[in-house]
Image (cartoon, rainbow, N blue to C red):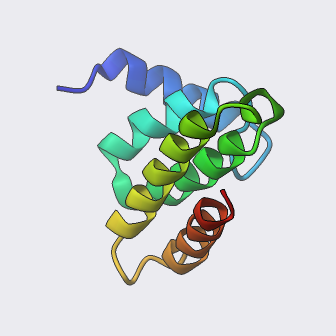
């Protein structure tokens, strides 16, 4: 069961951002939570921030952590429906990042 208070907090954070995709330390948690609630709406954004997080300087010397994030990004992107307009783009980005690792 999803914590509705956490969902409400995540939605508030998403509505107060001035960007298409939330970034920063809260982004992964917010998009993981919201993808569990509405995968077709938030899955592509989760895949995007997972790839972004895997490329962060903090993980430069942690190849296993980077691989884990990229594997998650690929899985999330693959789980999107074929008709999702962002599926191909985020899947290609995640696969390219995984292959480059």
On-image quarter of the C terminus? bottom right
Decide: is 24 above or below 69. above
Residue drawn at point x = 39 percent, y = 83 percent: 83
Q: Residue furthest bottom?
A: 83
User: What residue lies at 64% left-to-right and 51% top-to-bottom?
Assistant: 51
Seen from the viewer's position, the closer of residues 56 and 47 is 56
**Relative depth, front residue between 98 and 35:** 98
Instruction: Write the residue at 49% across / 74% down.
Output: 87
Quadrant position of residue 43: bottom left
User: Observer-nearest residue: 59 or 15?
Assistant: 59
- Counting from the top left corner in percent of width and height, residue 28 is at 56, 34
Work out whether residue 42 can be spotted: no
Q: Horizontal placement of 60 versus 9: left or right?
A: right
Residue 18 vertical placement versus 42 (above, below):
above
Q: Nearer the viewer, residue 90 or 2?
A: 90
Residue drawn at 64 percent across, 70 percent down: 96
54 on left or right of 70? right
Q: Position of residue 55 (x, y in %)?
A: 74, 45
Q: Is residue 1 left or right of residue 88?
A: left
Q: Which image quarter holds the N terminus? A: top left
Write down the quadrant of residue 64 in the picture: top right
Task: Count the marks.
Answer: 0
Can residue 69 be seen? Answer: yes
Q: Position of residue 15 (x, y in %)?
A: 63, 36
Looking at the image, residue 48 lies above or below residue 15: below
* Left or right, 25 with reference to 42: right
- Residue 33, how many percent across, how many down? 40, 33
Is residue 12 positioned above or below 36 on the image? above
């Amino acid at each position: 069961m999803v914590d509705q208070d956490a969902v409400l907090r995540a939605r508030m954070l998403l509505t107060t951002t001035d960007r298409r995709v939330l970034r920063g330390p809260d982004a992964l948690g917010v998009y993981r939570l919201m993808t569990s609630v509405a995968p077709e709406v938030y899955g592509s954004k989760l895949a995007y921030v997972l790839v972004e997080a895997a490329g962060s300087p903090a993980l430069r010397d942690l190849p296993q952590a980077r691989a884990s994030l990229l594997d998650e990004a690929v899985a999330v992107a693959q789980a999107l429906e074929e008709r999702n307009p962002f599926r191909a783009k985020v899947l290609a980005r995640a696969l390219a990042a995984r292959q480059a690792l």
